[in-house]
Amino acid sequence: MRFIDWLKPGVKVKRWILLGALGILMIAFGLVEWIQHRWYSLYYISFYIFLIAAGSFVLYLAVTQGMRSFIFLINRGYINVSLDSRKLENLIYEKRLLVKGPKIVVIGGGTGLSTMLRGLKHYTSNITAIVTVADDGGGSGDLRQDLGILPPGDIRNCILALADTEPLMEELLQYRFTGGRLENQSFGNLFLAAMDGISSNFEEAVQKMSSVLAVTGKVLPVTLDDVTLKAKLKNGNIILGESKIPEEALKQESPIDSVLLEPPNIRALYEAVEAIKDADAVILGPGSLYTSVIPNLLVEDISRAVQRTKAVKIYVSNIMTQPGETDNFGVEDHIKAICKHCGKDIIDYVVVNVGKVSKELEEKYLGEKSKLVTIDEDKIENMNVKVIEGDFIKVKNGLVRHDSEKLAAILIETIMDKKLLFDRKKIIEYFYLSERLKESKGIKNR
């Protein structure tokens, strides 16, 4: 094909664009002259009307003919545009579903929280993740010490869980350097640290990174204050630093009695408190009990807001016990620990796993001093907490994790049933959209 053959259609498109600009100028000139002078003689009125009418005709002609030329370019293959009506329909259903979804606030940190978010984002765009900033270990701890920023690790994981990114981009942001001065440092942490350098505060940096990665919902640090997590063991010793607490509890063979923040009276992020007030549901966990979930609730404004909100309050219990934190804990022990630190009226429902793991995997975890969390329903119900059971186990790379799809499905079902029971029409429409979306993505009901 000769150069001149594809040049002409492109020139026509540009020509119509210029003609459209001329039409806009004619309309604008006529209106401006009319407003400034307002000569009421028939001659001038006719002139202005003619000018505006001619400009409108020129603009109409430019738009219609320009679109024809553009479509011609597409049909001839000069511009590669693929419009899959099926995908477009699914996209419309997805957007309608997400906007209509319940307002959910999730509170915690670690891999458990990000796993749950990956499932929830397919049901609603009204998600606010409130994330702990007490981490002082690994790459996050290094950046915290070197640059004086809040630890970015847990926030990075939540942003990626809610982001609409290509697999390559996620792989890049999760990449850890294996040598040199950046050894064991995540590229995503460095990205967020760089954002912090060009922002007025850490909250703005998180918002900018969320915007770049097209995040569904919001990710918020629980506070902008620099905090340190301390633990008091049963033997009376005080352990300073989030990363050292489980290690010292195991070393001293003394379980955790309580945890607290230093300084104690830190300020919660205003947006986090407001999100809790407006929520349909507040979800705690899953994640490390003493080092991910409870630290957020030690911020007085957060725990007070959770106690006072009319939202459904759900705690997602861990599947496995964690050495140094929850050795030999049952679900009821997790709830007791939360209530001990944060007061009553903090949990309405608890989501527990009743699925089993293979014998080989169970023995592997036993060798690491970890086992399945036990359930005593009578004790839980005596605490005025209702139990929601399900098989939520998913084994990935030899590790037991929550199945994000199953967990999200039971959470959404519970929230819609308990919180939005009064609005049957809304529930029916929401679940209709949900089923259409799951069908389009090949997600089976479980």
Image: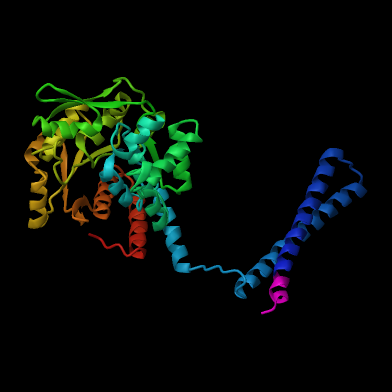
**Quadrant housing the C terminus:** bottom left
**Quadrant housing the N terminus:** bottom right
Taking the view exactly as shown, the residue that stands out farthest to the bottom is 1
The part of the image, by quadrant, that contains residue 222 is top left
Magenta part of the protein: which range?
1-9
Q: Residue at x 37, y 35 (%)?
A: 143
Q: Can residue 424 be seen at all in this image of the molecule? A: no
The part of the image, by quadrant, that contains residue 331 is top left
108 displayed left or right of 258: right
Taking the view exactly as shown, the residue that stands out farthest to the front is 180
Q: Is residue 292 above or below residue 85?
A: above
Where in the figure is residue 5, as x and y percent of width and height? Answer: 70, 76
Membership of 240 in magenta stretch: no
The part of the image, by quadrant, that contains residue 249 is top left
Q: Which of the two residues, 123 or 264, is positioned nearer the viewer here?
A: 264
Q: Which of the two residues, 5 or 39, is positioned nearer the viewer here?
A: 5
Where in the figure is residue 185, as x and y percent of width and height? Answer: 35, 43
Q: Can residue 29 be seen at all in this image of the molecule? A: yes
Q: Residue at x 12, y 50 (%)?
A: 354
Where in the figure is residue 303, as x and y percent of width and height? Answer: 28, 28
Q: Residue at x 45, y 58 (%)?
A: 92
User: Which color scheme is applied?
Assistant: rainbow
